[in-house]
Amino acid sequence: EADIYQTPRYLVIGTGKKITLECSQTMGHDKMYWYQQDPGMELHLIHYSYGVNSTEKGDLSSESTVSRIRTEHFPLTLESARPSHTSQYLCASSEPQGAGNSPLHFGNGTRLTVT
Amino acid sequence: KNQVEQSPQSLIILEGKNCTLQCNYTVSPFSNLRWYKQDTGRGPVSLTIMTFSENTKSNGRYTATLDADTKQSSLHITASQLSDSASYICVVSDRGSTLGRLYFGRGTQLTVWP
């Protein structure tokens, strides 16, 4: 049973719209992440957070922004969506162990389509 | 350049058969290697983790191996079931920073037919 929740599961919007993808976890994890996943490709890290009020950009340049006001909540916002933003967005969290020693717990993703 | 390569890209097998998925990496310095299973429409779920000192680890019908010298890992699935149909992703962590950077493979898409 997933303890990390993403909404919406699917979203189809027009170009130029502002959207927020929601992610919440009930495990009390300090570390949270946003990944982008396209078919047949590896996951790319776009944002991560060490804890409340901490946000960092990942490896993949993204026009999205994130916030971390509460431990359990890590929303991702696109101010003006474009067709190039069409992708699957996966949120994850992990326990505060270093060097990947703890597994990532993923949500079921948001499939975003920008027309 | 740190990379993770998985093969085959896709695989179709009949129910009850065994299969082996491969992962080769160039990540250095190496910390650990983890296999994830991603069902269609779901997020990845961790199956097993391999550290430098481990050669083999089993989790039910899944057995992972690691050869740190050749930088290769394999995931062997025994007596496959329809529910094994999924993408299997190899993820390698380095020891280059406190956070530990993760390097993802593109996955092997396994389809099990009845």
Image (tube, grey):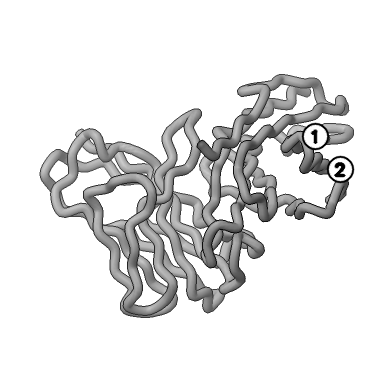
For image coordinates 21% across by 34% down, the residue present is A83
Left or right: residue B77 versus residue B1 is right
Mark 2 neighbour class, 10 Å CA radius: few under 14, some 14 to 19, many 20 or more: few
Q: Is residue B86 above or below residue B7?
A: below
Residue B114, percent from left and from top: 78, 23
Q: How many residues crowd mark 1 within 10 Å: few (<14), some (14–19), many (20+)?
A: some
- As drawn, the residue found furthest toward the left would be A16
Foreground pick, B64 / A8: B64
Q: Is mark 2 in CB contact (under 8 Å) with mark 1?
A: yes
Using the rendered view, name the quadrant where residue B39 is placed.
top right
SS class, disc 1? loop
Q: Is residue A61 left or right of residue B19?
A: left
Amino acid on which disc 1 is placed:
Gln
In the rendered view, does A103 fall on the left or right side of B84? left
Give the residue displayed 58% in from the left and 71% down from the top: A95
Residue appearing at x 18%, y 39% in the figure: A82
**Residue at the spot of label 1:** B81
The dot on residue B61 is: 2
